[in-house]
Image: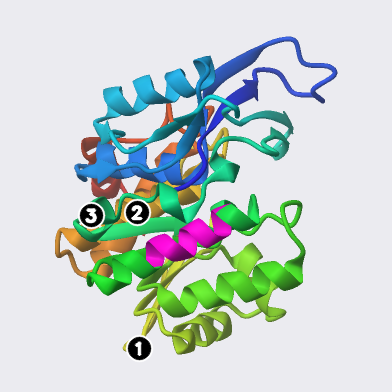
Amino acid sequence: MGEPMLEFNALQEGSLAEVAQFSVGWGGDTSNFAIAASRVGGRVGYLTRLGDDEFGESFMRLWAREGVDATHVGKDPSAFTGIYFISRKETKHFFTYFRKNSAASLMTPDFLPKAYITGAKLLHVSGISQGISDSACDTVFAAIGMARSAGVLVSYDPNFRPRLWPVERARAVIHETFRQADLVFPSIEDARMLTGLSDAEEIARVYLAMGPKVVVMKLGGDGAMLATLEGVRHFRPFRVQSVDMSGAGDTLDGAFVVGHLSGWPLDQCVRFANAAAALTTTGLGCVTPVPRREEIEALMAKQTP
């Protein structure tokens, strides 16, 4: 569940004022997660609110193509579907968002289809959805409560965005969500800002003490780290020719969850997810380069990090 946003990705380097052409695609961290999970064989549904507009219709068509069930996605005729622009200079990316008062940000708990949530194996949510508005934050917690009451696993990516909300509120909300989640996927950058700590293993132990059973720390170019009560293990990255890092973390989350729900050992889940995330960086946009299972397995066969 979360906030989808239509993506305009600059085809040339430079500021938005300098760029003349864009590649149009789809973004939003939890939508990216849903598509990544579906492409590697997961059975996925999505919950959100869209504007009754062409951008919203573009998402409905996307999810239909990708095999993501959108029967419980609502449309708000008085609001709009959010968009964002990506510009870049060398390896740095710059995001410009138009999302305030979007349909997704106006979600409230009464929108939630309880039977749909409690009938799932896992609910995935993110900190971005909590940061876009107070009502969306309430909706995320309500969905988590429904899931937990039915024994449904909860996975969570804090995806901390300082421009969305003050760090003090973000820290309180995100860490409370950690206490209610089973699987958490923080990036090392987010975790350092939220905890004030620098060492990845120390952060992982702090997060494990909050209650999740599994912490997968995303280390960017340094790979990933798996932490459970049994210990900590580092996984080196797969080497690819990276072009665009957008959505790589969301792909990692989705790939890991599908492996976990399939009963794979956690080490195998991390390695599979690590390879999936690496492949996502080889093309522009959050969705187009997201790999399918055969591509991931081919990379894993070539490299043994």
Mark 1 and mark 2 lie on one chain; the one further toward the N terminus is 1
Residue 273 circle label: 2
Q: How is the image coloured?
A: rainbow
Amino acid on which the number 1 mark rests in the picture: Leu
Residue furthest left in the image: 263
Label 1, secondary structure: give it. Answer: loop
**Residue 217 drawn at (x, y percent):** 49, 68
Residue 148: image quadrant is bottom left
Task: Give 89 or 16, whichever is nearer the viewer.
Answer: 16
Amino acid on which the number 3 mark rests in the picture: Ala
Mark 3 and mark 2 lie on one chain; the one further toward the N terminus is 3
How many residues crowd around disc 1 within 10 Å: few (fewer than 14), some, or many (20 or more)?
Answer: few
Q: Is residue 246 magenta?
A: no
Q: Which residue is mark 3?
A: 115
Q: CA distance from mark 1 to mark 2?
A: 21 Å
**Residue 41 drawn at (x, y percent):** 19, 42
**Range of magenta residues:** 136-144
Q: Is residue 285 left or right of residue 60?
A: right
Label 3, secondary structure: give it. Answer: helix
Amino acid on which the number 2 mark rests in the picture: Ala
Label 2, secondary structure: give it. Answer: helix
Task: Give 93 or 258, whichever is nearer the viewer.
Answer: 258
